[in-house]
Each structure stands twice: as structure tokens, then as C-alpha cells.
Amino acid sequence: MSESLTLGCPHCGAINRVSQARLNDGPKCGRCKKALFTGEPVALTADNIRVLVERSELPVVVDFWAGWCGPCKMMAPIFAEAARELEPRIRFAKLDTEAEQALAGRFGIRSIPTLIVFRNGREVARQPGVLQGSQLRQWLRPHLA
């Protein structure tokens, strides 16, 4: 990886270049001036996936979920806690498979919850099912920037 990373703004969709050395300094978007990292998972949609996942040089872990799914509800607080702990070394995002069925199909989601880690827009790891907090952190460790 280079000294700086390309990151999409979760608020306005602008592409930003951020020095890796400054990731922990609370970087803000050059366009909208809002924080690039909030410590909370970002909601992915067909409109923002290109900016937040495909063009991101920072690894992104996506939780594919649905509101009716009991195991997804169990995974949600674990995923949110990991986001508070591990951002900005990895971006956390959630994709509602009911609202974004075409995207879920594009990624071959057969069961939920399913976690996928993307690096430079490409899938590098996949994990179906609920993970406990320590299991999630251990699974993500090799993918942290």
C-alpha cells in the first residue's frame, strides 16, 4: 500500500486521499467536512457501494443481513462494537439484503448473516454465520490496515 489511501466519504460520496499516518487523527472529508470514520457501520446501497467499497484502498468488512433474521440481530451489536474498536484500520459496513436484493445476489449471498472482507474492491475473505466478538476480531486481524 502507498503512503496515502483513497477513501469514500460515507456522507457525501466524495473521494478523499488520506495519509496512512493520519488515519487515527480523525480525518474529515475535503468536500463536506464531516468525519470519514464515525465508529459505526455505514449502510451500503446500490448508490454508494462503488465509492465505499469498490474504490476504497482501505479494507472494508460488510455484514450482509436482514431485519427478520434472528442471528443477524444477534450479530449486530457485536459488529457495531468491533467498528468502534477497529476503525479506522478497517471500514465497517452493513448491507440489508431485503432492501438491496440485486446486490446480495451479485455477491452470491446464500445465507445471512454473511461477512465479506473487501480489499481494493475485491473479495478477500468470507464468513457465514454469527461470530462472537473475539472470533470476529481474530478473523479480521489479517485484514487490518
Image: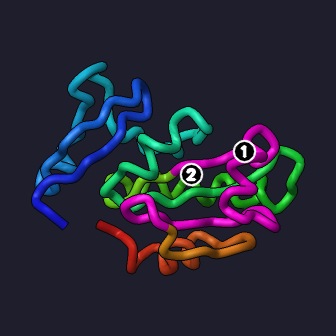
Helix, strand or loop at label 2? It is helix
Q: Quadrant of the N terminus?
A: bottom left
- Disc 2 packing (10 Å; few <14; some 14–19; many ≥20): some
Amino acid identity at mark 2: Ala
20 left or right of 131?
left
17 left or right of 32?
left
47 left or right of 110?
left
Q: Is residue 113 magenta?
A: yes
Q: Position of residue 144 (x, y in %)?
A: 35, 69
Amino acid identity at mark 1: Asp
Of the numbered discs 1 and 2, the one sitting upstream in the chain is: 2
Helix, strand or loop at label 1? It is strand
Q: Residue at x 72, y 54 (%)?
A: 104
31 left or right of 121?
left
Q: Position of residue 6 (x, y in %)?
A: 25, 48
Label 2: which residue?
80
**In this picture, is 45 found above or below 34?**
below
Which stretch is magenta? 93-122
Residue 6 or residue 77, whichever sits in front:
6
For marks 1 and 2, give the CA distance: 15 Å
Label 1: which residue?
96
